[in-house]
Image (cartoon, rainbow, N blue to C red):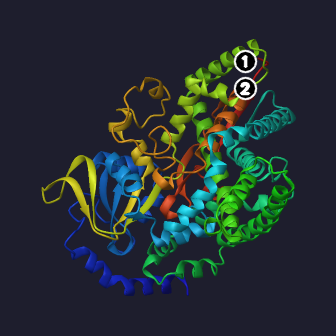
């Protein structure tokens, strides 16, 4: 079945359902929102073709924090950035809202049926088994791995700049190198596995991760986007059936990646089980997971298939999002010299205190004592939540609480909003993190100092870290957020301590594009005019003198 045939089948199967949704007693049709540009495509094409934050800022400015918008075939959905509504969906009523089936099916293409894709009791059981491996102590124990990989990157950059023969500076695609660093970190820290990404080892699994998501989902055609958005109307399993038969290069690579991960995961799991029997288990996440899983009662334990799915989930989610976060942070430092200089001053001041006490280098506890470092980290997570959206569907009729009343198109004022069962919710992590009511009149700006000035606690806190939507919240909050934070701080301190970052002199412009799956599109940096090359972030990197 080609894309056109699939589209026709979906259209025919859903006409009655769309009419039913439109005219049932509870309706969201009265909620203000942008005019539907196309009954067939809805807003999804506009959504994907605009640079990230352009759509979100327009919706916030023109319509507010709860907006009606359209998917394919005229389906009405809600775009949500209201704090009370987001809290209610993620935390206050977590079994009323679940990931839509089609989102779970699409997620399984990248993660298999691991923690990101499953729902209900399966999610509870998987989360219970994995939680012991992701505590604060466990994350801190991996700091030597983060530090080693960070310093390896710094040494490679120094050698590369020196070999270029152009003095103490060179133009480096920092995204490519940060992606390799993050992959090596996740390999060593999570699995005690050597990807060899920084060393460019001939590893087929490592190579399969290069621009994987962007290649598979980065710039779909209008027709392909329509099929991806509308396939939920087709019988369950159609998405997986099409995925396994899609011959495009991106989807072929995605399937190859799945095969390679499975081969490695099966060997790693067997090794960890043997180490557990021998009493030689390590501190990597997989060793801790295998150990915790074996201690559970039989009906709670994860099967080998489920553990393999967790490996695939951790390998992808644990490196791609972190690499992109670090990439945009270095870009902001290159754009805002005063932030970079203030951060470097704090790093050097802290290093002085470390040496004064008789130590030679940083610890995780030193990071916690650096307010500007923490502020910079929080600000990049706020302005660049790499997963731009969180999708949920109402399982039953419900009422959304609102922080601000909505004036409907009819003139009716809604203090809270009734929503019918089946309504798709797009929780905008970008929209929430740019909400001026939460973050101030300059919420659109990258300004770390806001975190030093904030004293009031939020009225309706969400998320697992600093009231940000970036790591989601509730029972589906990101399980690896502590791991990501310590890695971010480690890499940042290592690089800013040794290098200066500035924009290239050639005037190249970088745009923030939405790549990845529709339901949780990732922010990727691309060079204008070189979009075909995939994610890039060329920066001028200068070696600093001795401290």
Toward the viewer: 268 or 500? 268
Toward the viewer: 465 or 30? 465
Whole-percent x and y of residue 39? 33, 73
Residue picked out by circle 2:
362
Is residue 272 placed above or below 430 in the rendered structure? below
Residue picked out by circle 1:
354
Secondary structure, mark 1, is helix
Is residue 423 placed above or below 17 in the rendered structure? above
Q: Is residue 138 left or right of residue 188?
A: left
Q: Is residue 36 left or right of residue 123?
A: left
Furthest residue in direction top, as rendered: 356
Is residue 59 placed above or below 73 in the rendered structure? above
Whole-percent x and y of residue 392? 42, 62
**Where does the C terminus fall, quadrant-wise?**
top right
Asked whether the viewer can see residue 219, the reply is no
Asked whether the viewer can see residue 302, the reply is yes
The reply to whether discs 1 and 2 touch (Cβ–Cβ < 8 Å) is yes
Secondary structure, mark 2, is loop
């Amino acid at each position: 079945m080609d894309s056109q045939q699939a589209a026709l089948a979906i259209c025919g199967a859903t006409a009655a359902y769309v009419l039913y949704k439109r005219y049932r007693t509870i309706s969201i049709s009265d909620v203000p929102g942008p005019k539907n540009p196309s009954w067939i495509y809805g807003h999804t094409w506009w959504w994907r073709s605009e640079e990230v934050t352009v759509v979100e800022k327009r919706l916030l400015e023109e319509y507010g924090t709860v907006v009606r918008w359209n998917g394919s075939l005229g389906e009405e959905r809600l775009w949500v950035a209201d704090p009370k509504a987001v809290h209610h969906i993620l935390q206050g009523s977590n079994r009323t809202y679940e990931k839509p089936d089609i989102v779970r099916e699409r997620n399984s293409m990248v993660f298999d049926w691991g923690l990101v894709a499953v729902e209900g009791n399966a999610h509870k059981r998987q989360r219970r088994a994995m939680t012991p491996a992701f505590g604060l102590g466990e994350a801190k124990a991996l700091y030597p791995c983060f530090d080693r990989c960070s310093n390896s990157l710094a040494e490679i950059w120094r050698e590369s700049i020196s070999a270029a023969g152009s003095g103490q500076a060179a133009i480096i695609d920092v995204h490519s190198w940060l992606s390799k660093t993050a992959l090596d970190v996740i390999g060593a820290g999570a699995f005690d596995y050597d990807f060899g990404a920084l060393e460019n080892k001939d590893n087929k699994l490592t190579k399969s991760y290069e621009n994987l998501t962007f290649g598979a989902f980065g710039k779909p055609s209008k027709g392909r986007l329509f099929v991806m958005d509308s396939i939920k109307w087709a019988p369950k399993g159609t998405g997986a059936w099409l995925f396994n038969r899609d011959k495009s290069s991106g989807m072929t690579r995605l399937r190859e990646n799945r095969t390679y991960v499975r081969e490695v995961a099966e060997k790693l799991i067997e090794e960890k089980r043997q180490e557990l029997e021998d009493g030689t288990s390590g501190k990597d996440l997989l060793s801790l997971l295998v150990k915790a899983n074996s201690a559970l009662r039989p009906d709670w334990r994860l099967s080998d298939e489920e553990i393999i799915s967790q490996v695939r989930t951790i390998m992808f989610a644990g490196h791609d999002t972190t690499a992109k976060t670090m990439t945009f942070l270095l870009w902001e430092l290159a754009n805002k010299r005063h932030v970079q200089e203030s951060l470097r001053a704090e790093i050097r001041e802290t290093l002085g205190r470390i040496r004064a006490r008789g130590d030679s280098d940083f610890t995780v506890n030193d990071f916690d004592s650096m307010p500007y470092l923490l502020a910079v980290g929080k600000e990049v997570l706020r302005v660049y939540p790499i997963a731009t959206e969180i999708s949920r569907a109402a399982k039953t009729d419900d009422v959304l609480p609102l922080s601000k009343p909505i004036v409907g198109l009819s003139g009716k004022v809604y203090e809270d909003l009734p929503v019918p069962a089946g309504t798709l919710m797009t929780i905008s992590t970008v929209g929430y993190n740019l909400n001026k009511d939460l973050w101030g009149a300059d919420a659109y700006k990258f300004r770390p100092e806001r975190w030093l000035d904030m004293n009031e606690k939020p009225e309706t806190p969400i998320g697992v870290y600093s009231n940000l939507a970036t790591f989601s919240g509730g029972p589906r909050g990101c399980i690896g957020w502590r791991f990501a934070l310590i890695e971010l701080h480690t890499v940042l301190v290592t690089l800013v301590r040794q290098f200066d970052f500035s924009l290239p002199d050639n005037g190249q412009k970088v745009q923030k594009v939405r790549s990845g799956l529709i339901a949780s599109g990732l922010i990727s940096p691309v060079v204008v005019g070189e979009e075909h090359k995939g994610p890039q972030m060329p920066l001028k990197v200068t070696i600093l003198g001795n401290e």
